[in-house]
Image (cartoon, grey):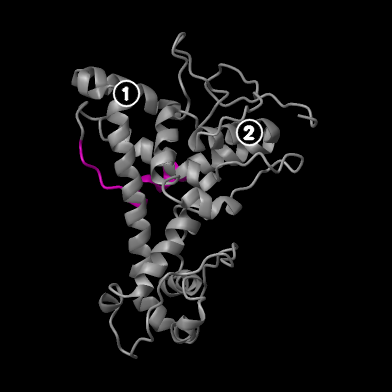
Amino acid sequence: MPRILTTRPLRAWRPNSIASPLPPLTPPRGLRATGMSQLASCSLRQLSLFFEDAYPVVLARGGFARSYLLMAAQHPAAIHIKNRLTNDMSFATRLADIPLDRINTTRGDIRQIAAQDIAGLYGFALSLPEDVKTIVNGRLQDHKYIFPVDPVTNRLKTELPFQHESIVSVLRKAVFTGQFKTKNLHRFSSTNDKHPDRLEVPDAMICLAATAVYAGLTAYRATGKHQKIPFTASAYEDVYRNHMRTLSDTRAHSRKPLHLVLHGLYNLVTETTTATPNAAGSSALLINLVDIPDSD
């Protein structure tokens, strides 16, 4: 049976509490109140969704659950849980709802933050429904909502993809809160070997925030008034994958400029005052970053 494995080790992560060994036939519902559920929650929230993939592919429930729950059971006190997960696939299958529920909860929480921010940032409360509908459909077309807008010329800054204020706000509130940045600073990296200190926001984190903003805008698309739409994988995974492809394709053609853009986004989200070199671009609708010399 296939398994889904992650590539990032959790050497630096240690749980605050460990579940005691479980009896052979303990049902999954009973487990959700134990430390195992708490461990899985921490593991998924801090690592996989934000640094790897916000919409992980689930080929097999047992293999998917086992890989994540094993990550959350590395402490010596969880040896019995670890052994059972390793040797009993049916046990892992019965626990699959724990990580899946945590994934859905985390994505839903981020969508809720986006929904609250969007109304204020776009001034929907002070606009007529027909005006809101026009604004929303204009931003959704060709995913214009990922670009910031020049306040003077009203031009889309297509040289700064994913730096729209709504995306910055969602990242700041949903991810960079409390001690998250301090505890996980070592997980942020740079794609520029010459400038390893220029940290970037990970692709998965960016695209999850952008997808949440998309979902928040679509809630107004039909009538100009907020409509409740479930934030499910089936409804928005294609949008998330599109954003991931956008970053991948842009990086393939303009690696250094995109590095500067994502480093600039990191500075915006973390409110870092360090100056970020500019990456020149065009005013065309599609992202079109101009390459820059290796020395920059």
At a point 60% along the width and 36% down the height, the residue shown is: 263
For marks 2 and 1, the one nearer the N-term is 1
Q: Is residue 11 visible?
A: yes
Query: Is 274 placed left or right of 68 in the picture?
Result: right
Residue that label 1 marks:
122
Rendered image quadrant of residue 265: top right
Query: Is 293 placed left or right of 207 in the picture?
Result: right
Magenta part of the chain:
227-240
Q: Where is residue 7 shown, x and y percent of the image? A: 60, 63
Tell me the amino acid under the disc marked 2. Leu
At a point 72% along the width and 27% down the height, the residue shown is: 291
Residue that label 2 marks:
258
Residue 26 or residue 35, whichever sits in front: 35
**Rendered view: 93 above or below 114:** below
Q: Residues within 10 Å of mark 2 (few under 14, many from 20)?
A: many
Tell me the amino acid under the disc marked 1. Tyr
